[in-house]
Amino acid sequence: MYKFDFSFLLERWPDFLNGAWLTIQLTVLSISLGFVVGTLCAVARVYGGRPLRLLVGGYVELIRNTPLLVQIFIVYFGLSSLGLKLSAEVSAVIALVVNMGAYTTEIMRAGIQSIHHTQLEAADCLGLTRVQTILHVVLLPAIERVYPALSSQFVLLMLASSITSQISAEELTAVANNVQSDTYRSFEVYIVVAVIYLALSLLYRLAFKAVGLVIFARRRRLGTAL
Amino acid sequence: MQAAPATSATVVRVTNVVKDFGTLRVLDGVSLDVARGQTVAIVGRSGSGKSTLLRCIAGLETVQAGKIEVCGHEVGRPGKVARAQLRHDVGMVFQGYNLFPHLTVERNITLALTLVKKQPWDAARKKAAEVLRLVGLTDKVSSYPEQLSGGQQQRVAIARSLALSPQVMLFDEVTSALDPELTQEVLAVMEDLATRGMTMITVTHEMGFARKVANQVVFMHRGKIWESGPTSELFARPQTAEFKQFISSEL
Amino acid sequence: MIQLNANHVWYLIAAAQWTVLLSLIAFAGGALVGLPLALMRVSPSPALRTVAGAYIQLIQGTPLLILLFLTYFGLGILGYKLVPLVAAGLALTLYAAAFLGEIWRGCIEAVPRTQWEASDCLGLDRFQQYVYVVLPQAVRMAIPPTVGFMVQIVKNTSLASVVGFVELARAGQIVNNSTFEPFIIFCTVAAIYFAMCYPLSLASRFLERRANAGRASH
């Protein structure tokens, strides 16, 4: 019978904490930037001219039909061979942002297109410019509509960040790899890390719920869906 | 009570406008003059083109031929409109109210004031309070549209357009989506506006309102103006068979 | 350092066969485990629902990479030889089962209540209701998102490279280690993945549109 041995935790728990902290930092940054990129692209996709729409469409299809691992390799190893040497963490963020941006584009596009054209007409008749209409009438309701999908995508990104361990970004999975090669308690180490990721997933979901309550004032006051 | 008598300034001039939707000709050579302070009611069956005419005047649709001038600006040709300037002069109220659901009543009204007219916050909020008083909804300033009845939402929509101090207000079947008991409160607001001298063009099914408040009535049929003239005369002496039929069916 | 040449590209394409194999294993395994999971999720027994639900939450809250490591080392503990293909196949099966189970549960629940009632009134028992009335309709609804999920499976096989399985991503690393042209190589690898995934994405969208059109015309 296999003897489970979690004693490595007594010594190494700071490492896990540091790894988790870096995971959080990496992913919060990537989620924020990725969201901005995705929203801009979604706006371009819905309101832009044909060449812009095709460009964004191409970007989205390219990212969504290739693995994140390969995207990370292209950024870290590929760009370095072209002369642009980036650290593992910076490469990780770039790859995650580009990846997040593509998925966010599709989600936000659905949200923006769900805003009825009569809302746009009313804004037009009040004299709002295109940009003002997008900022004040379209974006917030669109985000509110697709918020559950966005939250899920954000959590998925956090889980996917484990892949950046492959270019030695010192996040949680990389810590796990290091500890297990030191202690040879591989199975236990990965169970610990799996539990930490589960806890992070829960934490992220709660955080997004809280953020949602803060920015969607109407929902907070009335409790109804848009 | 009739609206204030018209002055000489022509606020809206429509000349021989033709509008197609694909192969369908919706407006077939329509001409109309609206003088300052007048209230014009456009009536007719569905499909007669009356809403389309209103939307063309509002600059929401382009026309294939003819000319529309609103407060001296030409409207309806792609690129020819100085949109922002047009919006200052024309206020539009829709059948579906089209309030912004994620904003409070006050913010719905102050949005254009702060963004388009670039007014400072205090001035905007004061104006919002003023127009809400005009439509009788002062206590709803912090409510969200979904907390209001249909009639209240429509009155807020009117207030929202009024806040921009337009020279002419357009109403597109604004009571058609309302329950009968809510219609009266909206018509009362419109009547009050007319009395205060606002130039108004309203597409409506409410014949009672048209008779009571409008100076001029325009009957549209199949994309043309079939009959038009001063209210009392038009209803008293209908000239065409179509209009006679329309009046009797609306009663 | 060797010059990058056509042989390398053929090597990559050959490795892609293993990607396809692993994807098929993952899909077959995932479907085999996913269907019972979906049925458990909609069963009247709260115990079954909870167990299936817990499994799905667990898998969906863990990175696939960690899952891979767990199966790889877990198999070692159980005394099996550490074979990358088996570990990867198992991990991807567990992963696919959770997601397919959720997708299919959604489709079963989307079959209108009235279908259950009508078949019940005709005297069919629960098993017959499933087999003859509910599942056929659920299956029709499930095809577009299932095809869409195939894309995820294909992309996720790239992680099998981490436990040493030589599929397309690993082949790219191997070629890179001898030619040191990472940009061209990994872009080529990406292009091959794209060639496999994009048709699936298009198919999924096409099927979705056709399914909606059919529904609208009723």
Image (tube, coloured by chain):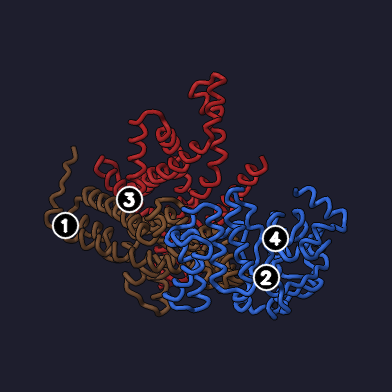
Q: Are marks 2 and 1 in contact (CB under 8 Å)?
A: no
Residue contact at pointers 4 and 3, CB within 8 angstroms: no
Residue at 52%, 32% (x, y): give it.
C113
Residue, far front: B1
Residue at 50% from the left image edge and 67% from the top image edge: B109
Residue at the spot of label 1? A13
Q: Amino acid at mark 3?
A: Thr
Q: Is residue A225 left or right of residue B187?
A: left
What's the mark number on residue B247? none
The local crowd at label 4, few if under 14, some if 14 to 19, many if 20 or more residues have their Cα within 10 Å, is many
Give the residue at mark 3: C62
Q: Marks 3/1: CA distance?
A: 19 Å
Whether labels 3 and 1 belong to a single chain: the reply is no
Cα–Cα gap, marks 4 and 3: 60 Å
What amino acid is found at the position of numbered circle 4 in the picture?
Val
Query: Is the same chain shared between marks 2 and 3?
Result: no
What residue did someone put label 4 on?
A: B203
Name chain B's colour.
blue
Helix, strand or loop under label 4: strand
Is the residue under label 3 in contact with that under label 2 (CB below 8 Å)? Answer: no
Q: For chain A, what colour was chosen? A: brown
In three-dimensional space, the C-alpha distance between marks 4 and 2, rounded to whole angstroms, equals: 19 Å
Q: Do callouts 4 and 1 point to residues on the same chain?
A: no
What's the amino acid at mark 1? Trp
